[in-house]
Amino acid sequence: MIIFDEIQALPDITTTLKFFCLDGRFDVICSGSLLGIHYRQIESNSVGYKFDMNMFSLDFEEFLWAKGYGDEIVQDLLNHVAGKIV
C-alpha cells in the first residue's frame, strides 16, 4: 500500500495513479486536508482509475465505538468526563 498525503501540494502526481492501478501490485490512498479547495488545480484525475471518498473526523463517542467499547462503558466514560461520577 502506498499513501500520498497532502496530495494537493503536488497536483501533477495524480497522473501517476492510473499507472499504479494498471500495474496491479499496489493499493494507493491519496489524501489531503485542502484537497477540496485545490481540486481545480489538478489537471488530470485518472478518470476510471479512482474513486473519491469524503471522510470526516470522529467525535469521542464514535472513536470509542470504533475501538470496540460498548454503550455502557462509553456512557460511564462520558459521565466521568462530565463530572457525573456514579
Image (cartoon, helix red, strand yellow):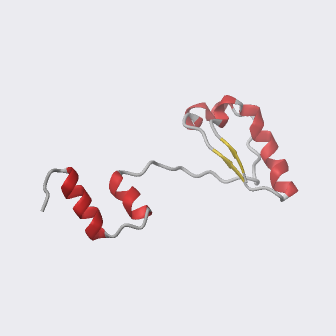
Q: Is residue 26 above or below residue 30?
A: below
Looking at the image, residue 9 sits to the left or right of residue 15; the answer is left
- For the N terminus, the image quarter is bottom right
The answer to which quarter of the image holds residue 26 is bottom right
Q: Quadrant of the C terminus?
A: bottom left
**Which residue does the image show at 56% across and 32% down from the upper left?**
37
Q: Residue at x 46, y 48 (%)?
A: 56
Q: Position of residue 58 (x, y in %)?
A: 41, 51
Residue located 66% across and 54% down the image = 51
Q: Quadrant of residue 8?
A: top right
Q: How many marks?
A: 0
In the image shown, does 34 or 80 lie closer to the viewer? Answer: 80
Q: Is 42 in front, or is 31?
A: 31
Q: Residue furthest right?
A: 23
Q: Could you say where residue 53 lies in the image, as x and y percent from the top left? A: 58, 52
Image-based side of 14 in relation to 19, left or right: left
Relative to 29, residue 6 above or below = above
Q: Nearer the viewer, residue 35 or 78?
A: 78
Q: Residue at x 14, y 58 (%)?
A: 85
